[in-house]
Amino acid sequence: MQFTRDFSHYVRAAGEGLQHIDLAVEGVHCAGCMAKIERGLSAIPDVTLARVNLTDRRVALEWKEGTLDPARFIDRLAELGYKAYPYETESAEATEVAESRFLLRCLGVAAFATMNVMMLSIPVWSGNVSDMLPEQRDFFHWLSALIALPAAAYAGQPFFRSAWRALSSKTTNMDVPISIGVCVALGMSVVETIHHAEHAYFDAAIMLLTFLLVGRFLDQNMRRRTRAVAGNLAALKAETAAKFVGPDEISQVPVAAIHPGDIVLLRPGERCAVDGTVIEGRSEIDQSPITGETLYVTAGRGTPVYAGSMNISGTLRVRVSAASEATLLAEITRLLDNALQARSRYMRLADRASRLYAPVVHATALITILSWVIAGASWHDAIVTGVAVLIITCPCALGLAIPTVQTVASGAMFKAGVLLNSGDAIERLAEADHIIFDKTGTLTLPDLDVINAADIPADIFELAGRLALSSHHPVAAAVTQAAGARSPVVGAVEEAGQGVRATVDGIEIRLGRPSFCGAEGLVGLTDDLDPEASIVAFSKGSAKFILSVRQGLRPDAQAVIAALKARNVGIEILSGDHEAAVRAAAHALGIPEWRAGVTPADKIARIEELEKRGAKVLMVGDGMNDAPSLAAAHVSMSPISAAHLSQATADHVFLGRPLAPVVAAIDSARKALHLMRQNLWLAILYNVLAVPVAISGVVTPLIAAAAMSGSSILVMVNSLRARGNSRESL
Amino acid sequence: MEILVILVPLALMLGLAGLAGFLWSLRSGQYDDLDGAAWRAIADDEPPQEAPAKR
């Protein structure tokens, strides 16, 4: 059978006889890398463009059509020392990028208008106390209107749209009082200008929009950055499948290019990238990423296999029922839908604040108008005073209070290795007081490891690792990795289902089943080994050794659990795995509360039970069976190795092998929530001071502008404190 | 004070020119890679055959 790599799915025509591809590259972090990659790739003949994007860690390549195979770029980058893989922009990321650009455009327009209106306002303010002629003042006011009205109509779109959406679904959000405030301020200013009045508030209205757009843009940028990183990580997983393109011909294609009905080959040691049904072959498969169960399942003709499961022993032909974006077991889908509905009932801190805020402010303005009329003022003066109240209380600081903290805190989390999927996840994480861990792939590492490596002489272990290079078995791969072996033993022979053997310096060495190496006697002797570990034997001449291979606990799991306990958080394990395995892990970590053999529905039931008691549950899990409970919990987290679906449902995704990001994320979230509350109090304090001044009717546009920018800057500066030393040791 | 009739529109024109410049730079993708652009400014001798970004 013949193998080829086919990346044509990712290649786009760039016009003028050029072709274009985007690659996600790992490990690009400095100017040196950038120059090295660009020069290395430009040196290939017929390449017309090689440009690194250091922010997104990607390379854009263009070359003359039909001259080069994209696989060559990936090989070239591998020679330079970078792992790369074609990248396809997901629709979610494309939307974020478009939205981000739109906000930046709005911000540019608003900032331009603010600067120019200010330029016109300052002469009016200073002219009012000196010798400005009323005609000159009117001229400046009309010019201000000319700039501010179109600019506000354009730059206010994000707020107006959101407010309209909220109102038409009969709810309210922060954008409703913002939109009302801006429109009323602009409308009144136009009327005042027509009547040659002394004060107009064009500057205050447009400045408000500028400050709020800064907050909005920061918030959006944080989400865009998360998407880009998550997109790269997904691409670099380089999920491919061996697809039959002829009866006996195989092409290694990216999963994105596989369609239902295709037939793929699943070799031993390969992770399945699609959902499908076995049509030929027999094997054992490891379904632990899907069910959490670590015992292998026997697969034969007609057995369904799901994306993420690992093929252990035999070769299988699989007919694809759904490609990468898995359609799952109907049960999981149904549970997930219910859980997601429940989640959407959560109300964000900002919305809760605005729900209280809007009626209070609008009532205050109304009472002000009526009181002044009763006190004998004219309707005109009363309304002007009422509008001044609205302008001065416009939730400028309130609108910035939360997004600025979120942006700074998410930057801190990003550094600690945690990505955010949703903006309000920080608030919810800060409230969590009970953590449920899944075992397989969450507390333990997703890959196998040799756990008794320390008991074996180093030279023997290294030899075993080199011999293991010649086998496709996943257990052998784990031995190779643990031993750090690079050069295979020459002349090694693999006996299917038994093991590998070779002869080195006249001595026969064997690695495989204990019976294959004549080491059955040793297995009974070492009863301290874990019952669920896979046992592999290694023999060199008459010397025999036993290697115990299993999924090890994450290196810092114990320390993390201890740190969480110190933070007064309840901890328990809910796992789909069998009892002995869960008990061993719980015992090793010192977690008294655990349940084994739990189904997805049981997990949700347990979460609901806890939430009924008033606990806020953080669910940390990775398997497909965890997806519904991730969605049901108050807040959720997944490792980056998780199944697609779990990653998409989780609020946070953490990177790398250690579990420490969980603690770091909780710490930053708690600090961030504290700062958000502090910011809201600052904003309220500002209003308490400013509103009486506005009600008394002495507010001039100058006071409004100074108060607004003063409170906004205060809140922004306070937010920066979320960045500080949030990474205390465990 | 009649000079205002010239100076104020002139100031606005300058502001508009700045805005137009900003929108152009946004459209031509100059904010797509801020980290990279910071380093490119101080990088020495780029290979001559390299074409500028087209987006």
Image: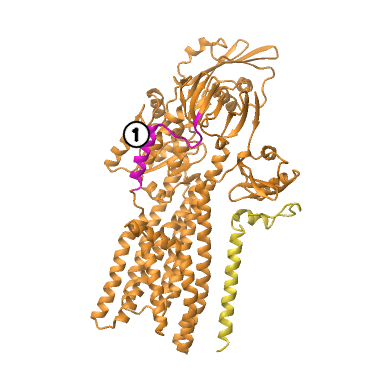
* Colour chosen for chain A: orange
Residue B4 forms part of the magenta stretch: no
Name which residue type carries label 1.
Answer: Lys
The x, y position of residue A468, in whole percent, is: 61, 21
Q: Secondary structure at mark 1?
A: helix
Q: Is residue A568 visible?
A: no
Q: Quadrant of the N terminus of chain A?
A: top right
Q: Residues within 10 Å of mark 1 (few under 14, many from 20)?
A: many
Snapshot quadrant of residue A570:
top left
Question: Can you name the residue that lies furthest to the left here?
Answer: A374
- Taking the spot 66% from the left edge, 17% from the top edge, the residue there is A492
* Labels in figure, total: 1
Which portion, as a residue range, is magenta? A320-344
The x, y position of residue A247, in whole percent, is: 61, 24
Apparent side of residue A373 relative to residue A676 in the rendered image (left or right) = left
Which chain corresponds to the colour yellow? B
Snapshot quadrant of residue A357:
bottom left
- Taking the spot 69% from the left edge, 45% from the top edge, the residue there is A37
Of A53 and A27, nearer the camera is A53
Letter of the chain that mark 1 sits on in the rendering:
A
Would you place residue A107 above or below residue A303 in this image? below
The x, y position of residue A466, in whole percent, is: 64, 22
Write down the residue under mark 1.
Answer: A603
Of A347 and B38, nearer the camera is A347
Residue A327 forms part of the magenta stretch: yes
Would you place residue A477 above or below residue B46 in this image? above
The x, y position of residue A460, in whole percent, is: 61, 19
